[in-house]
Amino acid sequence: MSRFVLTDAKDSSKPPPAGTKLALMSDDDYIPIPVDDKGRFDLPTFSEQRVKDMDFGTNVPKGDLGVRLSIDLATPPEMLDMATVRRIVSVGQRLRTELLPWYVRWMFPQIDGVIVCSDQAQWNLDWTEGGQRLRLPLPSEAQQREPETPKGKPSRACTVLTGQEQWPDAALLQPQPGGNTKLYVKLRNSRAS
């Protein structure tokens, strides 16, 4: 599931300015895109022919508005293996062309991996190779913040799997029991440019 949220450009935890409007516009047509009081909106789908001469616009001055995209993963942490990470990244390479209306694809970043965050910085990948059970500890990445962490608050421990690692597809994430582990899609940018 994906969600689109307009935010204040300087603080993505704040809603957009009151009265913010989005629309597809041309000299002959105006198609409003409803935005709720928290900045959430859904992108309407139209044929490229209908909106080919339209621009995506807003009543807010340039530079005052940000857009946040979040994508929820349905895979439970204990079922995340490297094959799933690679599949998520592969689908992410086609995200803009398959899931987003053509007129806003330029606004949203590519998917670069899966972020794993927990109360404890202890994760392993386990797999069997040549009849042996192998275990690889994953390091915490100090620069990676949990995406839902409020600005100015400390983040829980996180690590990132990009799918480019040399580990086998069957390597399965082993989160710590009781660690309250959550998965997130790692987006290339946090804000549209």
Image (cartoon, rainbow, N blue to C red):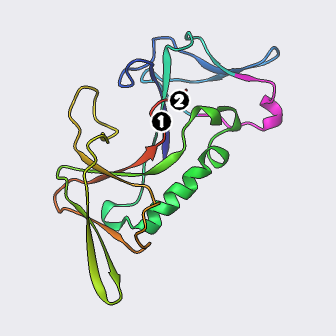
Magenta run includes residue 46: yes
Look at 81% across and 14% down and name the residue there. 27
Q: Which residues are magenta?
A: 43-55
Q: Is residue 2 left or right of residue 28?
A: left
Magenta run includes residue 79: no
Q: Pinpoint residue 121: horizontal percent, then vertical percent.
A: 19, 53
The residue identified by callout 1 is 189
Q: Can residue 34 be seen by looking at this rendering?
A: yes
How packed is label 1: few (under 14 Cα within 10 Å), some, or many (20 or more)?
Answer: few
Answer whether labels 1 and 2 touch (C-beta < 8 Å). yes
- Label the magenta part by its dominant secondary structure: loop
Vertical side of 7 occupied by 82: above or below: below
| Disc assigned to residue 20 | none
| Amino acid under disc 2 | Ala
| Amino acid under disc 1 | Asn
Q: Is residue 49 left or right of residue 90?
A: right
Q: Pinpoint residue 134: horizontal percent, then vertical percent.
A: 28, 78
